[in-house]
Image: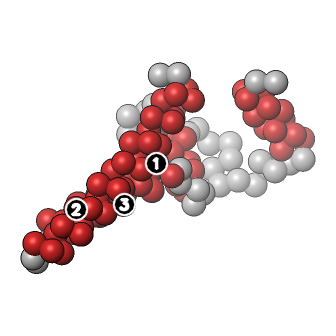
Amino acid sequence: MKFSDMAERQILKAQAEGQFNKLKGAGKPLDLSGDGSADAVGFRIMAEAGALPREIELRKAVEAQTRVVAAAPDAETRRQAVKKLADLQLRLDIEQEARRRFYGS
């Protein structure tokens, strides 16, 4: 069974059980602000629900660690911060590659 078929079954089951009935924004059009892509809309909806994908969490961590590297007061602190940044960037790259392979793009 394909993943899309399984997802469709879960959606239909949730609809039948009324799990979508009192959701925030029910019956209103989706907010397509930003770039309007399906990914962007999906990420925004997940963020509002408190369920960010690992890739997004890693992006935020890379941004934060980049600021730590820039503010490092001495060479040893900077070296440790750069090491952590490299690890985070590698993990982010792995997540992005996994997503690309999964979606075939």
Q: Which percent across, then down, holds residue 90? A: 36, 48
The residue pinned by badge 1 equals 55
Front residue of this view, candidates 61 and 73: 73
Q: Residues within 10 Å of mark 2 (few under 14, many from 20)?
A: some
Instruction: Tell me the distance, in whole angstroms, between the alpha carbons under discs 3 and 2.
Output: 13 Å
The residue pinned by badge 2 equals 82
**From where the camera sits, is residue 67 visible?**
no
The numbered mark at residue 61 is 3
Where 69 falls versus 46 (above or below)?
below
Q: Amino acid at mark 1?
A: Glu
Front residue of this view, candidates 1 and 47: 1
Instruction: Tell me the distance, in whole angstroms, between the alpha carbons under discs 1 and 3.
Output: 10 Å
Where 97 falls versus 43 (above or below)?
above
What residue appears at the point 47 percent right and 22 percent down from the top-left corner?
Answer: 105
Name the secondary structure under disc 2.
helix
Question: As drawn, which residue projects farthest toward the left?
Answer: 74
Question: As drawn, which residue projects farthest toward the bottom?
Answer: 73
**From where the camera sits, is residue 30 visible?**
yes
Q: Between disc 1 and disc 3, whose residue precedes? A: 1
